[in-house]
Structures are given as C-alpha cells and as structure tokens.
Amino acid sequence: MTHPLLGHFRMLARYNRLANERLYDACAALGDDGRRQIRPAFFRSIHGTLNHILVGDRIWLTRFQGGIAPSTGLDAILYEDFAELRAARVVDDARIEAFAEGLSEAALGGTIRYRNNEGCDLADPVDLLIAHFFNHQTHHRGQVHDQLSQTAIAPPVLDLHRVLRP
C-alpha cells in the first residue's frame, strides 16, 4: 500500500502551481505601483510577499534535496522586476511538482537537520516539514489575497476544491 501522504503532497504541489497562476494573473492586472504599495503586511507589499514565498520555497527545496540553506533574508527581494519574478515562480512551481512526484515512502520517514533563521539547530520529520512547506505557501498567498482585496482588482478564488476542480 502506498503512503497516503504521497498522493496528498502531489495534489498540493499541483494546487500550488494553479493557485499561483491565478494569483499572479490578478497581481499582473494591478500594475507595479499597486504591487509595491506599502501595506500593513509582514513583507510590506504584494511584491515583497510574493518574493518571500519564493524565498521560503527555495530554502525548503534546498533542504529537502540535502543542501544547506539558512533561513536568513526572509524579506529578500529576489526579483525587482515582476515579469522576472513571475517567470521564476513558474520554474520553481515546476521544480515543486517534480519534487513531489519524486517523493518516496522512505523519504517521508526521514528527518532533516537544519539551522533556522534564529540560528537554532533543529531536526524535524520530513513529512511534517513538507506539510509546513505547503502550508507556508498557502498562508502567504492568503496575505496577498487580502492585500489584493484592498485594491480595485478582485482577488481570485483560491479555495483548494475550486482550484483543483476540472
């Protein structure tokens, strides 16, 4: 019998890609000034939050693939240009789907050791960290969704069951 989280994580990887496509379409309609407007949010703007999601994804993918990635610079702006940010998002979403497709039961039973942004050395179960990875994306997409609701652009529907509906 296949580990039930394998299918679940593959579904979440697909959802991540589709939700990002919807979210980036809406953000593109807003324009650069609107995306960069300072708002009451952890990462100060829609543009900052979109960059943060990518920063987090890259940190965790590096860790999942056995690399060392400290959690520093969580507010880094990886891409000033929205078109470049969007193109990077597409590439990384494909990487996330490939990662999920390549997961094995053995990998889910493992542990990852890493250093967090406070300098603490930690060890956590892989299945928990992958669940966190997808939850982190959804959490911050929700913040962008809220920020979009403060503009003239209607935020897209991001409900899992609606995004994944054929």
Image (spheres, rainbow, N blue to C red):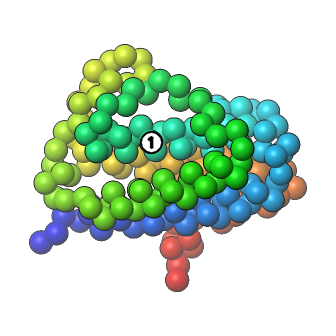
Where residue 51 appears, x then y in whole percent?
A: 61, 40
- Residue 136 versus residue 118 in the image, above or below: below
Q: Is residue 138 visible?
A: yes
Secondary structure under the numbered disc 1 in the rendered image: helix
Question: Which residue lies under the disc numbered 1?
Answer: 58
Front position in the image: 34 or 131: 34
Q: Quarter of the image containing the N terminus?
A: bottom left
Where residue 135 appears, x then y in whole percent?
A: 45, 48
Where residue 85 appears, x then y in whole percent?
A: 63, 48
User: In percent of the image, x 64 and y 40: which residue is there?
Assistant: 79
Name the image quarter holding residue 6.
bottom left
Toward the top, the furthest residue is: 119
- Residue 3 versus residue 63 in the image, above or below: below
Q: Amino acid at mark 1?
A: Arg
User: In percent of the image, x 26 and y 49: which residue is there?
Assistant: 127
User: In percent of the image, x 35 and y 49: which residue is there?
Assistant: 131
Packing grade of label 1 (10 A; few <14, some 14-19, many >=20) is some
